[in-house]
Image (cartoon, rainbow, N blue to C red):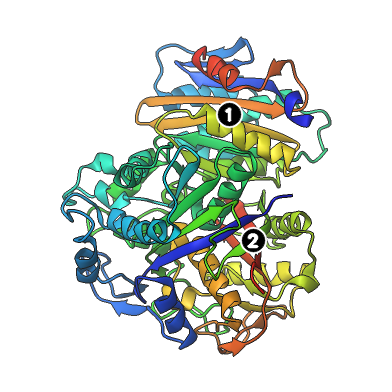
Amino acid sequence: MNNTYLSYNNIVSSLGFDSPTVIEKIRNGESGLKLVADTSIFPTPFCSSLINTERLENKFANLGNIEEYTRLEQMLIISLEATLKASKIKLTDRVGLIISTTKGNIDTLDPSHPMPEERAYLGTLGHIVKSYFGFKTEPIVLSNACVSGLLAISVAKRFIAQGTFDHVFIVGGDVVTPFILSGFNSFQALSPQPCKPYCKQRSGINIGEVAASVLVTKEKENLAPEAVAILGEGTCNDANHISGPSRTGEGLYRSIGSAFKEAGVSAVDIDYISAHGTATIFNDEMEAITLNRLQLEKTPLNSLKGYFGHTLGASGLLETIVGMHSLYNNTLYSTLGFSELGVSQPINVITKSTPKKLAIFLKTASGFGGCNTAAVFKKVTP
Amino acid sequence: MKRQLLKIKAYASIANNRVSLNDGIVFSEEKNDLSAFLKQAYKSLDTNYSKFFKMDALSKLGFLAADIILKSTQKEPDLERNTALVFSNSASSLDTDRKHQKSIQDKDNYFPSPAVFVYTLPNICLGEISIKHKLYSENSFFIFNHINTGYLFDYANNLILSNKADEVLCGWVNCDGEDYEAFVYLVSTEGTIPHTKEEILKLYNIK
């Protein structure tokens, strides 16, 4: 079977506008989360990881007119431009574009937003990105709740395997909006402090914003040094509840099983797990149960939500990119905010940046609608 | 090759106040708004799932269309099926998004409802179908400006050829104000209609 690879990549976030800068800050335990007191976004102060608007617009001014593009479009274009440029790939009808987002330009539904409400159509967002870069193929917009970013990688791999494309560029992003904050708040899921995944003292999630992009390709030549092969992936539903995870973790259990089967690996082959870890009790507990069912409780694991918050449609993509660099740097990055185990079953939470020889990692994500995604990645160059 | 064997086993549509399964109309009701029409269709089609009434219009549309296909192709009632769900549309969940936005408009007096917010994700519809039919299977929701038979065709083929699913329930389920339509079809190794891009488009256009 031919392998598919994840290669050139970029992260636009509060911690920086390129992957190496962001990774260095993660290694140093620096968080992008801050208390934000801005009543135009939310009536009470909230904890979030926001991209500095002035910096974003300054950066975008080199690429286009800031008046013509929404905040999210600016983020996506900045990120994808860097990845495209580094890849040196020519945009032909063999090159696909996937945009993963949960809510897209949802902020334009607010009557006070300067852009028309029609901008909230996700297909429009896809075509704006397509036109900016001149992609020759129809954009594929994937909106599958919080697994979108990781599922986009599976989708790219599947289209390449099916012969639809030779290369696929994925760009994922979501912005922090009153729409999202009020919604998560209505579930009483928002933490007023920096989130603490898997920790006894946790009190819920933070919402953050990033854009991230990656090249998925079938060609082994000209890969980025941190490139990984996608060995297997799977997306399975809990078939249990639309807004809460299954207590037994059935969908995640089956997703990891499906990914392992395709990858031809078992629990002992996994060096590291980049988990979802939203820091809600139900999510963290479900993951701990699932990992124990799979004998993965001793495998080092982190959640990166303490650095960025939950970045929705970009989170799985962002966290996979960090995982690629983790393998490349042979370093396990810590779960920021964690101090004392707060789930009912043992898991091996990484508490400080640790050098370790790494070859294979498992990435997981779970979201509303009972969806779960898992993927196994392997370092290309030893 | 398994590839040549893939077929469309069944298809269903909900549009223009009509619900169809394969080449027959199973319910129709003239002069009704969408909400009343869906309620009547639910009763007439013996859907028997009380949580239906909590759903938003997009989920109701996708759920009903999926339900009539899955019921009509069920072999044994308790046998677990590995049927992937691959839906697409152009308006995502915008119909419900507008409701949520309206409820948060007044900053001094806002109480958004979690029961509305949860439906601001298009894939919730897939979750509803999965729960009713005990499908622990692949779920993906795509947004295109128009039905993209090429992408749906390739994606469904891949899910079956890579053994991730035995069958794939694919389709287009859209709800944008009073504009609505649902068209779903079951891709399988069994059936009489060839699974081709042209055939998908033909079936979509006759709804």
Q: In this view of the protein, which residue sits in the foreground, A112 or A357? A: A357
Q: In this view of the protein, which residue sits in the foreground, A161 or A262? A: A161
10 Å crowding of disc 1: few (<14), some (14-19), many (20+): many
At label 1, which amino acid type do we have?
Leu
Q: The N terminus of chain B is located in which quarter?
A: top right
Residue B163 drawn at (x, y percent): 76, 42
Q: Which mark is residue A229?
A: 2
Residue that badge 1 annotates: B64
Q: Which mark is residue A68?
A: none
Inter-mark Cα distance, 2 to 1: 40 Å
Q: Is residue B71 visible?
A: yes
| Kind of element beneath mark 1 | helix
Taking the spot 62% from the left edge, 10% from the top edge, the residue there is B23
Taking the spot 32% from the left edge, 71% from the top edge, the residue there is A50
Taking the spot 55% from the left edge, 75% from the top edge, the residue there is A303
Residue B116 higher or lower than A183, as above or below: above
Q: In the figure, is residue A115 to the left or right of B188?
A: left
Residue A249 drawn at (x, y percent): 69, 61
Query: Are labels 2 and 1 on one chain?
Result: no
| Kind of element beneath mark 2 | strand
Residue A193 higher or lower than A135, as above or below: below
Chain identity of mark 2? A
At label 2, which amino acid type do we have?
Ala
Q: In this view of the protein, which residue sits in the foreground, B77 or A75? A: A75
Q: Quadrant of residue A292?
A: bottom right
